[in-house]
Amino acid sequence: MLRTIGMVLYVAGYLLVNLPALLKAKLLEKDPIKHEAYCRKKIMNFCRRCIKVMGMDLEMRGLENIPDCATLTAYSHQSLLDAFPLIAHMPNTQSMVAKKELESTPLLASWMKAGKCIFIDRSSARAGMQCILQGVELLKNNINVTIAPEGTRNDGGELLDFKGGAFMMATKSGAPILPVAIEGTNRMFEGNGHRLRKGKVILSVLPPIETKGLTRPEEKALPERVRTIISEEQTKLKGELYQ
C-alpha cells in the first residue's frame, strides 16, 4: 500500500512542479519540431522515473524490429501500467490512443494532448470513426500511433478479441503494424488487489507486418493474425516469468 500511495503522490507532485514546463510547451506550439521534441523528452523522462518509483524491473526485447517508417503499434493490454514502458523505452511511441474519460483529468490530460494522444469515445461509432481518421492522418504524416486492439484490459488472462477498427488506421494509411507483447504488469498492480508491488516485466517487439497491397480478405484477417502472433509471444513470456 505504501508503494501505491508513494506513486500517487509522486505523479501528483511531478505534474504540479512541471506546470512551468507545460506553459513552455504551450509557447513552443508555434514551432512544431521543437514542441514535439520538448514534449517527447518531458513525457519520456516522466515515465522512466515512474518505472523506478513503482519498482518495475523492465526487460526490453526486439527493438531491432522497429522500422524507420511510421507504424501502428498494437500491444497486448493487461494493466494500467502498460503505457509506462511503451512511452519510456519504445523509441517510436508518439501518439497513443486512450479512453475518452482521461481527457478530463487535470494536468495529465494537458500532457497527453501535447503528446498527440488520441482520445476515443467507445460508446459512439461515429466518434470511433473520427478516431480512426485521426490516426490515419498522423501515420500519413510519419507519426507513430500506439493502440491496444483489445479495447480494454484483459487482466493478465487470455487476450481478448482484437477490434478491426484499430487496424483500419494501418490499412488506410499503408503503415506497417508493429506487434508488441507485454507481460508482468498485471501482477504488479491489478493482480495484487490494485496495490503496487515490485515486479519483473518483459516488453517484446515482434517483426512488423506490412499492410500495403493486402487483398480485402487479408485485411479482414489482420486482427486475428496479429492477435495470434502476440498471443503466442505472450504465452512464451508467461512461461519464462512464472515457471
Image: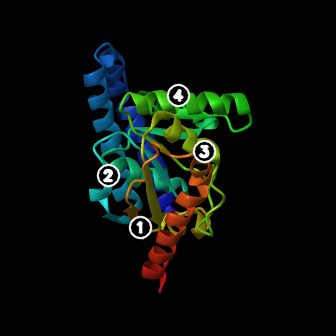
Name which of mark 2 and mark 1 comes first in the sequence: 2
Of residues 19 and 137, the one nearer the viewer is 137
- Of labels 4 and 3, the one closer to you: 3
Classify 10 Å Cα crowding around label 4: few (below 14), some (14-19), many (20 and above): some
Disc 4, SS: helix
Residue at 33% across, 31% down: 39
Amino acid identity at mark 1: Val
Residue at 38% across, 52% down: 50
Disc 3, SS: helix
Between marks 4 and 3, how big is the CA–CA gap? 22 Å
Q: Which numbered tag is attached to residue 90? A: none
**Which residue matches tag 1?**
201
Look at the numbered discs 3 and 1 and tell me whether their residues touch, using CB distance below 8 Å: no
Point out residue 31 in the picture as x, y percentages from the top left corner: 28, 16
Disc 1, SS: strand
**Which residue matches tag 3?**
216
Point out residue 134 in the picture as x, y percentages from the top left corner: 53, 28
Between marks 3 and 1, how big is the CA–CA gap? 37 Å
Q: Is residue 78 visible?
A: no
Name which of mark 2 and mark 4 comes first in the sequence: 2
Between marks 4 and 1, how big is the CA–CA gap? 31 Å
**Which residue matches tag 4?**
134
Amino acid identity at mark 4: Gln
Between marks 2 and 1, how big is the CA–CA gap? 20 Å
Between marks 2 and 4, how big is the CA–CA gap? 22 Å
